[in-house]
Amino acid sequence: MACFFCQRNIKEIDYKDTRLLSRFTSSLGKIKSRKKTRLCAFHQRQIAKAIKRARTMGLLPYLLK
Ligand SMILES: [Zn+2]
C-alpha cells in the first residue's frame, strides 16, 4: 500500500503545514516511528526533515511536557 504522501503524489512536504506535520508526531511531540506513520522510507525521511525544520523555525515544539 502506498504511503500517505505517495497516495497524494506529494514529493516535498511543506514544513510550514504544522497541522499536517502534527499528524506525524506523538502526543509528546516526538516524530512517530515508521511503524506508526506507515510512510515509505523516502517520505519518512522527508517528514523527519520537515518536522526538524519546523522546530528550528519555532513552528513546532521540541517536546511537549
Ligand atoms: Zn511515500
Image: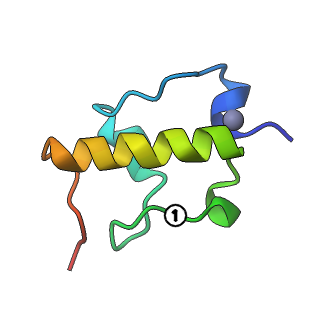
**Label 1 CB sits under 8 Å from any ligand 1 atom:** no
Which residue shows up at 64% across the image and 64% down it? Answer: 36
Which residue shows up at 43% across the image and 67% down it? Answer: 26
Amino acid at pointer 1: Lys
Q: Quadrant of the N terminus?
A: top right
Q: Is residue 37 left or right of residue 16?
A: right
Q: Is residue 20 above or below residue 38?
A: above
Q: Is residue 28 above or below residue 52?
A: below
- Residue ranking furthest to the bottom: 65
- Residue ranking furthest to the right: 1
What percent of the width, then of the height, locates residue 30? Answer: 39, 67
Q: Which residue is mark 1?
A: 32
Taking depth in this image into account, of 27 and 31 the one nearest to the observer is: 31
Which residue shows up at 20% across the image and 80% down it? Answer: 65
What percent of the width, then of the height, locates residue 55? Answer: 22, 50
Q: Is residue 7 left or right of residue 53?
A: right
SS class of the residue under badge 1?
loop
